[in-house]
Structure formats: C-alpha cells, structure tokens
Image (tube, coloured by chain):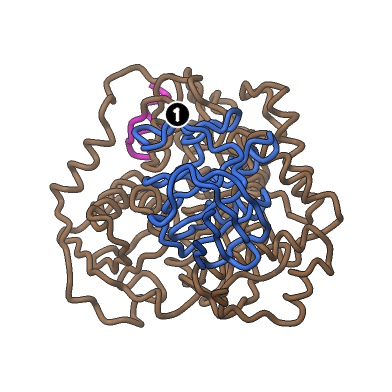
Amino acid sequence: MIIQGRAIYKGKAQGMSLVCRQMISFFGGVDPDTGIIVQKDHDQKGESIANKILVFPSGSGSTVGSYTLYRLKQNGIAPLAIINRECEPITAVGCIIAEIPCIDQVSIEQIPDGAEVYVDGNQGSIEIK
Amino acid sequence: MRRSSLILTTEEDAMLNGEMGKTIQKAMEIIVGLGKIYQAKRLIPVSSVQVAGVSYDNLGEAGLHFLESLAQDGAKCRVPTTLNPAGMDLHNWRNLGISSDFAEKQWRVLNAYEQLGVTTTCTCTPYLIGYSPKFHEHIAWSESSAVCYANSMLGAFSNREGGPSALAAGLTGRTAEYGFHLDGNRIPTITVILDFPLPNTEFRTHLFGALGKLIGEKITSEGKKEIPIIVGLINASTEEMKSFSASIATYGGLALFHASGLTPESDLFPLPKRSITISKTELEQTLQQLQTGLEQQFDFISLGCPHLSIREIKRIAELVQGKQVKVEFWLTTARKTKELADQLGYSEIIEKSGIKFAADTCCVVAPLKNRFRAMLTDSAKACFYAKSKNNMDAALISFDQVISKAIQ
C-alpha cells in the first residue's frame, strides 16, 4: 500500500514502524541517551524509538524538544524517519536540524505497528510492505 | 506529491540549494519547513531578530553542538540579532556561585553565537535597550514576554519563534509569512472587561503579573486560542506592562493582546460581542494563590523578571540606601542597563547593601535547580518557573514589599 502525504524534510529510509496513538513531547518524554519513551501515561511508554519509523499524531511540549531529536541523532539512536498526522514546529525543526526524513498529512491509522515501512521524504510518500 | 504553495525568490532558492553555504542552507530549510506547515505563500524580510536558547542550562550538550556546527562555515546574521538571557552574569558569575564547568560551556555557547554574527547582548527586554521595533514592523523574536510586548504594546509583527527558527531568520533575513505577520490574524476575539479600578499606586508590577495570569488562564481555560481586547487597563507603566506581557504569555500562552486606550492597534477593531468580566474578587484570589507559602523562611530574593528597567533600579537604590540585606538577593537586568546604573551611582548604593547584580541572566534560565528552597519576587512569571523548573517555592509580593522584607 502506498500513502501520499506532504514532505516536511527530505531523505529516504526503510525500517519497522512504531505507531503511537498519543502525542510525543520529546523534551522530557524521550530519554536522549537510550531513545526510550519515558513520557508519563504514554501508550508506547518503555518502547525505543531508536532506528524505527516513528509514527505519532503530532508533537507537543517544550520547543527544546527539537534539540532532543538532534541529540538522539548524535547518539546514533534517532528514529529513521518520522510520520505525523499534523507536523508542528518542534518536530519539524528537530527533523530539519537532525536530518531525519519527515512526512505529515497522513492518516496514521492506516499504518500498522511493527510493519516494514519505506519512507520517501523527497516525494512525501510512504510504502507499507 | 502534494505541492507546497510557498513561492521563493531567486535569492531564497539559492540559499535553499546551498549556494551560500551549508549553514545558510540549513537556516533556509528551517524557514521553508515552517512556511510549509503554516501554508505560507511567501517569505518576508525581518528587520530585527531575538534568539532564545542561550543558557547552557536549557541548551545542553546537543544545543551547544548544533550551534558550534553552524558556526563553522563563516555564515553571519544579515539583520540585527540579539540574545535572550544566558545562564550566568558574564562578568560576575563566580560571585553568584556558578561553577567554572558551567561557565566554560556558557562561554562556548556565546562564542558560537558571536561567530554567527549575533550581537551577544543577553536580555529578555531588548525593547528597553534600543532594539525597539516600530508599528507594523516585521520581526522574529523568541522570548515569549518580549514577543507579547512587541506585538501588543508596540504593534510590531512577530510570531513566537523557537531558538533555531529565530536564528534561521537572522541568518537568512527572512521569515515565513503566517500567523501574527498577517493583519487578519491579529483581530481580537474576546472582550475582557475590568469592572473595577486598579489601585492608584506606583510600581504595581506584582498586580499586573497576577492580572496577566488571571486573564491568560481564564480565556484559555477551554483550550481555545484567543486574542483579548482588555477594557479598563489604563495608566499602566512600561514596567507594569512588561510584567503583564510576561505573565499572560506564561500562563495563557498568549503572544498578542489589545487594550483599549493603551495599545496602538486597539482602535483598529470593533470590540467583539463575546465578553467576560474580571472582578476585583478574582484578582484578589489570584494574588492569594501566588502568595501561598509567604509565612515560610526565604533563602532567595529576585527582582528583574523580565529584566529591570533603569527606573526600577533607581527605585531600589532609593529604598536600600544605607540598609543591609542578609539573604541572597539578585537583581537581573541587561548589561546596558547595569552600565547606566553604574554611571548614575545606583549600583554602588545597591551593592553596598549586599544585593548582587546578575546582569545578562535571570532566575528562570540560571542553573538554580535545587539550590534554593524558597524565593520572594514581584514577578508572576518567575513564580511559575521557580516551581516548574528550579524546584523551589515562590511567593509574589509588591516591588516595594520585596525590598522592605529584604532589609528587615
């Protein structure tokens, strides 16, 4: 299945999806040294976002969260790509400075958790294998 | 592919394609990325930029690394760009108990900004030290209280930028045209009526802070974004409105308000029919909330959130002349304002009392977590961050009362 969205940041990636129903606040919500979601009451709490195709509705919280994505990338444990329903500035700026492909305007309910997903951030398209 | 409707000029396109180097390219990617999200049709020039994300306490190693990597290729800001407060007084940090490890990291942050062509004046009140935009001037500021003040009190046009997007605006001289840059997004949505006169005294900063919290929380309580026009807020000083702007931004997330007879855009619009009334009782309740814990022993006192004006420093000098304070007491202000206070002799009087100047920094962004137990202040914004960021209690009292408590 191919889904067409809007390209926010360029680049291509392939990997396994981690689908969150809740928003993510990167600052304080993801451990920058392990990549594990530590956000209180989060539906994927305890899961690692490292080297996953990370799917969530939208970002929230402090704007310092952009730097959390950058730090994850420096530590080699950033997501391979990010897919949002509606991207907001914290995630967008984080993806741009950390060079993580990012696509939004996607009905994320169509993406199963743990699926093999191919992301083309240049075209804004997603292929679920 | 869903096409973005954002149209770039030849020069902007060249920046995006890397023809002006990697740093300018990265900056333009940020501006264009935000333009896409907010469906901007074009980019517009900005004439003034103010960048948050200066204190090493907030930036951390990742932020420092990002800034140093940007600073490598010689790119410089194209428009006047200043900084938010740093994590320490750049001269007097030892006397304020800042560690040399922290100071070294903080200096690296400032050096990176300097290499990027940023003017390293570290203040949340650029409008008090000569960076004062004119009516309907497009700017890209990030400090929430300054954005709110510039939009509302000066009628300038700014969104609330994040640190990287403000820096990107400085490096490219552009921002995407969306949000508060468009006339249609500045129209008031709700009328807020103050149905009582505020007491006619001087230095009512604490009262305006409480009022900012009350209005900010009340109009956003249902999660709706509002632009209030306030009726009855008159005869307010610059200092009181800087306190109000900081508080309504902190507690309500607002970046723009209007006030009839006070703010320059207020007579451009009819009053919205939808209205709420703020009563004296509600304001008293808010003040009480902010004063809980006033009975306990305070080990820290701070004035200058947002940064003190020269008038406030003069007032402090008058009140503490010949007196002594026994508790750790910081005055936070812009370096320029401190220099003026030096010249006028206020600093000497104040420092003799035991009060310390902490220029370039503030009690929100300095590394104060777990260092003090409880703080006294005249700033509603400082109360919020004392609790949420620095793990200390805080109580709000009037400007003059803060001094009288300190010299008891």
Residue of label 1: A46
Can residue B96 be seen here? The reply is yes
Residue depicted at 17% across the width and 57% down the height: B278
Would residue B291 be found to the left or right of residue A104 on screen?
Answer: left
| Picture coordinates of residue B124, whole percent (x, y) | 55, 50
Q: Say which quadrant the N terminus of chain B sits in.
A: bottom right
Would residue B92 be found to the left or right of residue B114 on screen?
Answer: left
Q: Residues within 10 Å of mark 1 (few under 14, many from 20)?
A: few
Nearest the viewer among B158 and B129 is B158
Residue depicted at 29% across the width and 69% down the height: B229
Q: Chain of mark 1?
A: A
- Is residue B278 located in the magenta-colored stretch of the structure? no
Nearest the viewer among A50 and B288 is A50
Element at badge 1? loop
- Number of numbered discs overlaid on the protein picture: 1
Nearest the viewer among B266 and A2 is A2
| Picture coordinates of residue B12, whole percent (x, y) | 73, 75
- What colour has chain B? brown
| Picture coordinates of residue B139, whole percent (x, y) | 58, 68
Q: Is residue B29 above or below residue B68?
A: below
Amino acid type of the residue tagged 1 in the rendering: Gly
Magenta highlight range:
B394-408
Q: Is residue B269 above or below residue B218?
A: below
Can residue B308 be seen here? The reply is no
Q: Quadrant of residue A71?
A: top right
Residue depicted at 36% across the width and 82% down the height: B268
- What colour has chain A? blue
